[in-house]
Image (cartoon, rainbow, N blue to C red):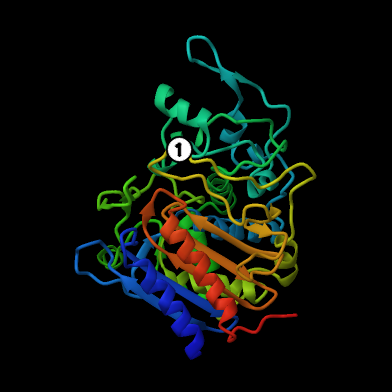
């Protein structure tokens, strides 16, 4: 680890755990194609607990689960077990029951109709199937408030049965698509999603500290989610956890992990699908997966914070064109941090963020546990962390 990279990144981490609008604690790592080149920790697992953050602290990684589920889908495609353009209901019949929401009648009852076309797994991978989230979509929030639609954090089958916000394939909207992808994987493999991931992704990559149901060891190292108040204060929420024995292994948000384990997954994408204990994806699969899959008129847009306690209005690199692949956000233009066009990245609800720069052969992950999403201190800290990586002079940047 170079001294410039270490001092620059350490400085960013220290800056976010001090001051009025501090974060409780943070773990951040950077890897090249072969190993981590930076590992940093600062602050506490729970504010005021005296328990310091450590490199093996466990986080609810929320939507950074999605790319792992997407990888499991791509493996099914490679083996000829899944046609991305076949109706998804041929693998999971329940998804064929979803109807399009066209508003609410005078009595507040949802107005539903049959969709014009079937949902495909490709649409699910690209977030163009018509599904959303209640914390980003006012219609879903209304369904939750008035119709008792369960939240996806219940990890229940009922939470998946949301109406569609538009006809499948019409546009891009971020939502519960990868939860359905997890169900498709289970249907094809005849096993729970966590078992499939363990056998086919985690074992080849040497990933162990990553699960849908916390082990006693992982629970003892768990970082607590905090709620950021309007005044900037932080309230620990030790009871805010996903169900310990979830009915559904939610492919969109259900994993817990220590950050060093996720770095092994990032390295697989840097190494064209190869892991230390075997190949996870074929090189040609990776090359195809990292290209924009959206059609003309389908664009990645700002995520509106509909439930203020869960999310702020959030967007990466406002003003820059962004697209979506299988299953990451792509920045289509060079980003101000130094991230080149064509890089991969995404985030998790409790303010975890990562990027994968395949051009230059490195990537990073920034983990905090704060709600709402888009926390200014954590998000700006992450942007500064990524910038420090590129400006340190110790990461070789391709011309």
| Residue occupying the far left of the picture | 49
- Closest to the observer, 73 or 263: 263
Instruction: Reply above or below: 222 against 153.
Output: below
Q: Is residue 146 visible?
A: yes
| Residue occupying the far right of the picture | 296
| Residue occupying the far top of the picture | 106
- Residue shown at 50% from the left, 15% from the top: 109
Residue 54 locus on image (x, y percent) = 32, 74
- Residue shown at 45% from the left, 36% from the top: 159
Residue 375 locus on image (x, y percent) = 43, 54
Q: Is residue 397 left or right of residue 275?
A: right
Give the image quarter of residue 307. Answer: top left
Q: Is residue 35 left or right of residue 221?
A: right
- Closest to the observer, 150 or 321: 321
- Closest to the observer, 60 or 296: 296
Residue 393 locus on image (x, y percent) = 59, 85
- Closest to the observer, 186 or 333: 333
Residue 102 locus on image (x, y percent) = 61, 21
Secondary structure at numbered mark 1: helix
Q: Residues within 10 Å of mark 1 (few under 14, many from 20)?
A: some
Give the image quarter of residue 397. Answer: bottom right
Q: Is residue 259 left or right of residue 264?
A: left
Give the image quarter of residue 396. Answer: bottom right
Looking at the rendering, in which quadrant would you find the C terminus? Answer: bottom right
Which residue does the numbered mark 1 point to in the structure image? Answer: 157
Instruction: Reply above or below: 200 against 124.
Output: below
- Residue shown at 41% from the left, 77% from the top: 11
């Amino acid at each position: 680890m170079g001294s410039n990279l270490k001092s620059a990144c350490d400085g960013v981490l220290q800056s976010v755990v001090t001051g009025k609008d501090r974060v409780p604690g943070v773990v951040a790592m950077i890897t090249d194609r072969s190993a981590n080149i930076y590992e940093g920790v600062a602050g506490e697992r729970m504010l005021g607990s005296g328990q310091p953050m450590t490199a093996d602290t466990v986080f609810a990684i929320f939507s950074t689960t999605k790319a792992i589920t997407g990888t499991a889908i791509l493996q099914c495609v490679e083996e000829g077990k899944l046609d991305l353009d076949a109706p998804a209901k041929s693998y999971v019949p329940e998804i064929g029951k979803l109807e399009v929401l066209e508003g609410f009648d005078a009595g507040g009852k949802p107005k539903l109709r049959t969709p014009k076309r079937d949902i495909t797994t490709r649409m699910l991978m690209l977030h163009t199937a018509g599904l959303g989230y209640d914390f980003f979509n006012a219609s879903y929030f209304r369904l939750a408030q008035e119709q008792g639609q369960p939240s996806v954090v219940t990890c229940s089958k009922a939470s998946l049965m949301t109406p569609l916000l538009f006809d499948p394939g019409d546009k891009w909207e971020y939502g519960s698509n990868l939860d359905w992808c997890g169900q498709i994987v289970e249907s094809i493999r005849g096993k729970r999603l966590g078992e499939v991931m363990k056998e086919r992704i985690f074992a080849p990559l040497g990933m162990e500290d990553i699960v849908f149901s916390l082990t006693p060891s992982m629970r003892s190292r768990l970082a607590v989610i905090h709620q950021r108040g309007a005044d900037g204060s932080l309230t620990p929420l030790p009871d805010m956890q996903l169900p310990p024995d979830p009915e559904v292994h939610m492919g969109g948000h259900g994993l817990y992990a220590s950050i060093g384990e996720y770095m092994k997954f990032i390295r697989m994408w840097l190494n064209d699908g190869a892991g230390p204990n075997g190949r996870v994806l074929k090189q040609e699969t990776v090359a195809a997966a990292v290209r924009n899959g959206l059609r003309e008129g389908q664009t990645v847009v700002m995520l509106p914070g509909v439930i203020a306690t869960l999310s702020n209005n959030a967007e990466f690199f406002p003003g820059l064109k962004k697209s979506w692949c299988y299953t990451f956000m792509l920045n289509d233009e060079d980003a101000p941090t130094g991230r080149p066009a064509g890089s991969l990245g995404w985030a998790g609800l409790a303010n975890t963020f990562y990027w994968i720069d395949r051009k230059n052969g490195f990537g990073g992950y920034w983990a905090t546990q704060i709600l709402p999403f888009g926390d200014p201190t954590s998000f700006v800290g992450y942007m500064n962390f990524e910038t420090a990586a590129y400006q340190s002079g110790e990461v070789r940047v391709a011309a």
